[in-house]
Image (spheres, grey):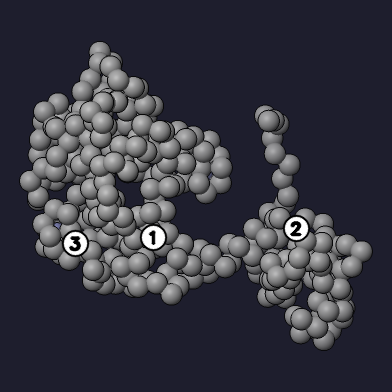
Amino acid sequence: VTDDPPGQLDPDPVFSILGNELRVQILLELYDAAREGRLGEDSIPYSGLQTAVGEADSGRFNYHLEKLCGHFVRKTDSGYKICEPGRAVARLLSKGTLTETTTFGPTRTDARCHLCGGTVRVAYVDQNLVVTCGDCSGVFSTSHDGGMLASIAVPPAALRGRTPTELLSLTVCQFEHGMAMMGDGFCAECCGHVETELRVCEDHEPVDTEEWDGSAPEEGDLCENCGRVIPVIAAANCQSCDRRRLGPPILAVGDTVIARRTLDGRVSDDGWERFAAIRWLSDGLGRTDDEWFLQYSTPDGGSFRVDGSLSVRGDE
Ligand SMILES: [Zn+2]
Ligand SMILES: [Zn+2]
Ligand SMILES: [Zn+2]
């Protein structure tokens, strides 16, 4: 739409909201009013707002309310109303990303490891759901204890009211949708431009890259070059907010009709079982003169390719 540099608010007022309890309270009251109110009835009168936040000192209340007015809060005929930047601050606070320090686990789930049949465990570390198996070395290497099966960023709000098994299921489900959005070229987090690529390990050790037929290699075989059991992965990287996702390449083309049909036709389970099975869905890698591609079979006997820039090429 525009290549002009975006209009920028000085960051100081943004941080001064988070650093001031009364300003946060005012925003949260107005946010609740906007959530509960019907269209056009989402303002709170001055006195009602002062009572709601419980600030007896009118001078102090007025001072902080004025600081929010303009960008975060708007004055209307019937009082004060939250604006989109104010909602964004309130949402960020309710998501827990900035404020919560929750960690747990590793905790056992009802899910089974697709490599060895062991119990899948989940831990919540640095706002990532870390999925491990205690009985095998997993699908990629990290510094975490146990075999790594997945590590996916998920906000603390996702933990509320959910069992470890439910949390695992919803986390891989949101990963599948988020990866499909990023594969479409825009960020699930910020709508910024996303770049995607097929990353291939040329010197893969557990199985020769060109010989790999898409199946799961022997458990315990992690490549010393790429640290993974299979030689290929899709990478998506937001150019605006730097959100990065690594995952099964078919998920990055998951919004195309042919990939959606293949996914739904060949992977019937949901939750963790679906996510785990998707890893072994391809028929292996091939290459043209200058680039690698992944080959897939469709349920009706056709085939398609996913190329180096994660674009789908039909029957060839
Ligand atoms: Zn295992
Ligand atoms: Zn490798
Ligand atoms: Zn982004």
Residue type indicated by callout 1: Leu
Q: Which mark is residue 270?
A: none
CA gap between label 2 and label 1 equals: 30 Å
Question: Horizontal and vertical percent for residue 29?
Answer: 72, 73
Mark 1, Cα crowd under 10 Å, few <14 / some 14-19 / many 20+, is some
Q: Position of residue 154 (x, y in %)?
A: 42, 59
**Label 2 element class:** loop
Q: Is residue 39 visible?
A: yes
How crowded pointer 2 is (Cα within 10 Å; few <14, some 14-19, many 20+) is rated as some
User: Which labelled disc corresponds to residue 170?
Assistant: 1
- The image quadrant where one finds the C terminus is top left
Q: CA distance from mark 3 to mark 2?
A: 46 Å
- The answer to whether 12 is drawn above or below residue 260 in the figure is below
> What is the x, y in percent for residue 185?
49, 34
Task: Looking at the image, tell me whether mark 2 or mark 1 is earlier in sequence order.
Answer: 2
Of circles 2 and 1, the one toward us is: 1
Helix, strand or loop at mark 1: helix
Instruction: State yes or no: Cβ of the residue under disc 2 lies below 8 Å from any atom of ligand 3.
Output: no
The residue at 86%/73% (across/down) is 45
Left/right of residue 216 with respect to residue 41 in the rendered view: left
> Seen from this angle, which residue lies furthest front?
300
Q: Which residue is mark 3?
A: 112
Q: Amino acid at mark 2?
A: Cys
Which residue is the site of mark 2? 83
- Tag 3: residue type? Arg
The picture quadrant for ligand 1 comes to bottom left
> Where is the N terminus found, in terms of image quarters?
top right
Q: Residue lying farthest top?
A: 289
Q: Is mark 3 within 8 Å of ligand 1?
A: no
